[in-house]
Image (cartoon, rainbow, N blue to C red):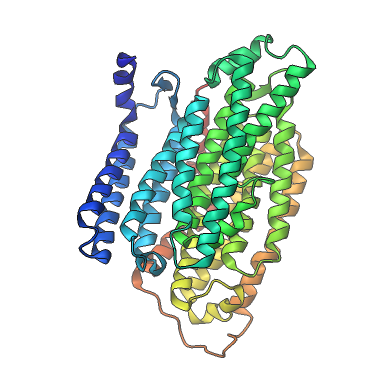
Amino acid sequence: MIEIIFDSIPSFWPEITLSLAFVISMIVEFVTGRKGKTSTGMVTGMVVLLGLVITILQLPFQDTAPRLLFGTMITVDPFAMFFKYLILAAGILVVVFSMQSSEIRKQDTVGEFYCFIAALTFGMLLMTGASHLLMVYLAIELVSLTSYILAGFSKKLKRSGEAALKYVIFGGAASGVMLYGISLLYGMTGTLDIYSLQAAFASGTVITTQWTMAVLLLSVVMILAGFGYKISAVPFHFWTPDVYEGAPISVTAYLAVASKAAGFAIMTRFFYVTFFDAVIDLGKWSSLPHFDWNLLLALLSVLTMTLGNLVAIWQDNLKRMLAYSSIAHAGYLLMGLVVMSDLGLAAMLMYFLVYFFMNLGAFYVVMSIADRIGSEHIDDYRGLGKRAPVIGVGLSIFLVSLTGLPPMAGFIGKWMLFSAVIEANFIWLAIIGVINSAISLYYYARVFRNMYLREPIDGDESPITFSPLVIVITILFIVPNIVFGLYFGPLVSYAQQSVNLFLR
């Protein structure tokens, strides 16, 4: 065992670096936390930011040859590496966002906020490669516990405390249900290693009667409750709108992008390794002969995208609207899992890349506007296009990209997903996806109308000024949304490479 541990450490250095950054940031906060709240928070934030940057710079030097670490606990492969880059990049940007957010800076314990960001990121990195159900559970719990704290970080706001409480209740229930499902799976097979689980189910000795099939289905549905809770899939989504609305906007952005990415990474690895067989020459996957899991995932996809889009129509708070939009996008992403092919997985990864730019950009603009006008209500965005032209154009581009209209990057993401679904003969699923995209245009158009076609409620048409840093960051998000909508070849190639080397 000692030999296995030492042999695994060289491939685990990025996670070790981030855990050291977390410990150092806690020490810095403990030593200097009482000497000056504002400056201490900035110092701790810089320590965490430096740790995240060093960690992401280590990834290119990490051995990406598919292998297992610490026995069968963690898998290192390009699939996990893809999500690590995504999560760490989102973490760096969220720390930068938080340093600008008045919502964060005015808190008494701002230094601790950055410490928990480091811990949350570490948990997400573990989720990307977890290949043992015990590690799956521990990684999800680490992410959940830190998320609860961050969601309720604005202690003086009633909605923040309410969000944290609801998050804890739903998270605790989902965690318990998932753990019981894992115990059933262990009772059937005697193993928690997903590769051993695949071998057991492929042998045909586990599922021998209708009763064992029923127990398997029950256990997977229970485990799916834990995954569905992390990705905000219906019917495990009830916490999402309240938490997204009550949490600080930078935390909401992190949960909407990085936490969702980690959830999809762990869910994809579980289903594709445990229940599917790959035909490598054709890039196709087939479900093991006991249940058509793709039909279950297709139903989950339809429910998620449809409910998310329909309920978003009635939202007046922009953060809450983006929360239901995030639920709908989880439904689109699930389409990539349904088709059971490398093309579907590549489309899902491609969608995550463009989702990173358009969703983080939208949340950053909403945070910047809220800092200036003190509101997230859609009606308070009246006349914003004239009063803050750059910010208004930026938000419009991000929302158009989220809708999936050309020539924005979001169109390429949806086009790849729908193409993969049609190729797999799930034409009905593609039609539902297109209809849902049309529905999303309606509630995004409400924001456009308020910004450009309606006058401010109080008649105030004076310009709203933003710092040069806010303008620069907004433009930096605008550029990839336009460029990758026109020149997307490198992103597609990277997504395909991350799937082709996936450890099976």
Q: Residue at x 30, y 16 (%)?
A: 2
Query: Can residue 306 be seen?
Result: yes
Q: Is residue 491 left or right of residue 446?
A: left
**394 vs 81: above or below:** below
Q: Nearer the viewer, residue 322 or 467?
A: 322
**17 vs 390: above or below:** above
Q: Position of residue 468 (x, y in %)?
A: 35, 72
Q: Is residue 235 left or right of residue 23?
A: right
Q: Position of residue 77 (x, y in %)?
A: 44, 27
Q: Residue at x 50, y 60 (%)?
A: 247
**223 vs 190: above or below:** below
Q: Nearer the viewer, residue 324 or 210?
A: 210
Q: Is residue 368 left or right of residue 45?
A: right
Q: Residue at x 56, y 76 (%)?
A: 381
Q: Nearer the viewer, residue 383 or 210?
A: 210
Q: Is residue 132 left or right of residue 430?
A: left
Query: Can residue 405 be seen?
Result: no
Q: Residue at x 46, y 45 (%)?
A: 145
Q: Position of residue 326 (x, y in %)?
A: 60, 53
Q: Which residue is the extreme one toward the bottom?
A: 459
Rendered-image quadrant of the C terminus = top right
Rendered-image quadrant of the N terminus = top left
Q: Position of residue 78 (x, y in %)?
A: 45, 30
Q: In the figure, residue 172 lies in which quadrant?
A: top right
